Amino acid sequence: MRLLSSTDKQLWRLALPMILSNITIPLLGLVDTAVIGHLDSPVYLGGVAVGVTATSFLFMLLLFLRMSTTGMTAQAFGAGNKPALARALMQPLLLAVVAGLIFVLFRYPLSELALHITGGSEAVLEQARLFMHIRWLGAPATLANLVLLGWLLGVQYARAPVILLVVGNLVNIVLDLWFVMGLHWGVQGAAAATVIAEYVTLVIGLLMVWHVSRLRGIPFALLKSGWRGDSRRLLRLNRDIMLRSLLVQLCFASLTIFGARLGGEVVAANAVLLMFLTFTAYALDGFAYAVEACSGEAVGARNATHLQAIWRAACRQAGLVALTFSIVYAVFGPYIVASLTSLTELRELADRYLIWQVIMPLAGVWCYLLDGMFIGATRGSEMRNSMAVAAAGYGLTLLTLPVLGNHGLWLAVTVFLLLRGLALWWIWRRHWQRGTWFAQST
């Protein structure tokens, strides 16, 4: 078999723009970590790690706004249903804005609750508090941007998400360097840079959606009335994906929480190591996003042949990319860590756990791709159930902490990724054996 078939090339045309734009997301995290990591104490880096974990927990809990938008948009796109395309944008956008305003109104109690749950040293928690009080102000834009990105992915307009993500994250990086290094605003500067960049991204995203709507022949009148209509399917799908996202966030939040209880140095080292996992996940998500769009389009058009061809191409190409990441981390991992922090003790501690970053690209690539298949098919309940299996395996693996320490935390993450992929694969295989994949699902 040729390395690049026509289907592989089609997949790369969809995936490559998203991979390049997605890389700017962890690049932003790398800049945050590098800038804060070069301050005179690990307390600042630990504070940002806790603050980012706490705010991201709730933001990512509402990641269903992007996922459900992509799936329902892609299905409407495949069926050529313009009123459904308008509803797939406007209904979740309304939900996003309302949820964001609630976060702004309750930002102070939310911050205190998060810090109480997290625990750790008071110095780290104070820095996290300063970060969160500002970061919550960007919530309406953050959540609205999830919807805009999901809709643009669903209509397979790859250029728009690239512009949306790259420009927004570059603005964030420039402001981060200016506020933290130039104006010496510390963790508050990092938070302010993120908030401003989110609103810049929102403006760009709205302009791009307007442009794509005109290209796809969706009139403004249709968009204006798009919030009306039956939203029960959207709400059911969002409920299931929210529960699935809750389990994901509980598992990854516990990584910071247990790391904090193992010591301030451990949570700071794990913050550095998470950059490896985050960078890999966002890059491989470029393939997952391509699979989402193709899966949803195939469900809308009832085209099983095209869907299977895309799936095989995704396995081939994403598997090779994951292997490349593992090799790069094995060879250059210590140099990457050294570039992220100048604190010798922190670098030495992070180097002890680099082996897990070598393993995880190959352990996780399959669950990312299968997520894309299920999101595009809007099979939320099955995603929820498979995530429950993975979370249970993660929790059981945490029992090794008294013996393995921080190695136990990273082992639990690896088990979590493997079980996600295995559970989804088993469900996927059953559907194809029974011929039920294209049955209506919510």
Image (cartoon, helix red, strand yellow):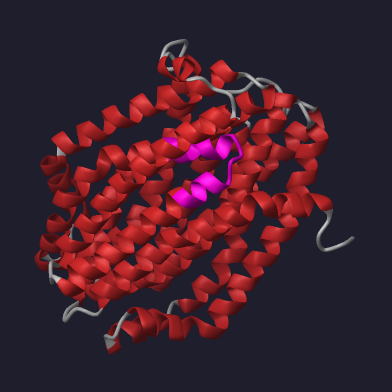
Is 256 located above or below residue 382 in the figure?
Answer: below
Q: Is residue 174 left or right of residue 425?
A: left
Q: Looking at this view, is 229 or 380 the one in front?
A: 229
Quarter in which the C terminus is drawn: top right
Give coordinates of residue 134: x percent, y percent: 16, 51
Give coordinates of residue 218: x percent, y percent: 54, 22
Give coordinates of residue 203: x percent, y percent: 34, 41
Q: Residue at x 37, y 57 (%)?
A: 169
Q: Looking at this view, is 433 or 53 the one in front?
A: 53
Is 82 located above or below residue 259 in the figure?
Answer: above
Instruction: Look at the image and tell me whether residue 408 can be seen.
Output: no
Q: Looking at this view, is 256 or 325 the one in front?
A: 325
Quarter assignment of residue 75? top right
Give coordinates of residue 104: x percent, y percent: 18, 38
Report the residue that reaches farthest toward the right.
1
Please give the range of residues in magenta: 146-163
Q: Was residue 383 drawn as part of the magenta stretch in this picture? A: no
Report the residue that reaches farthest toward the bottom.
344
Instruction: Look at the image and tell me whether residue 88 can be seen.
Output: yes
Q: Is residue 76 left or right of residue 168?
A: right
Q: Residue at x 35, y 82 (%)?
A: 349
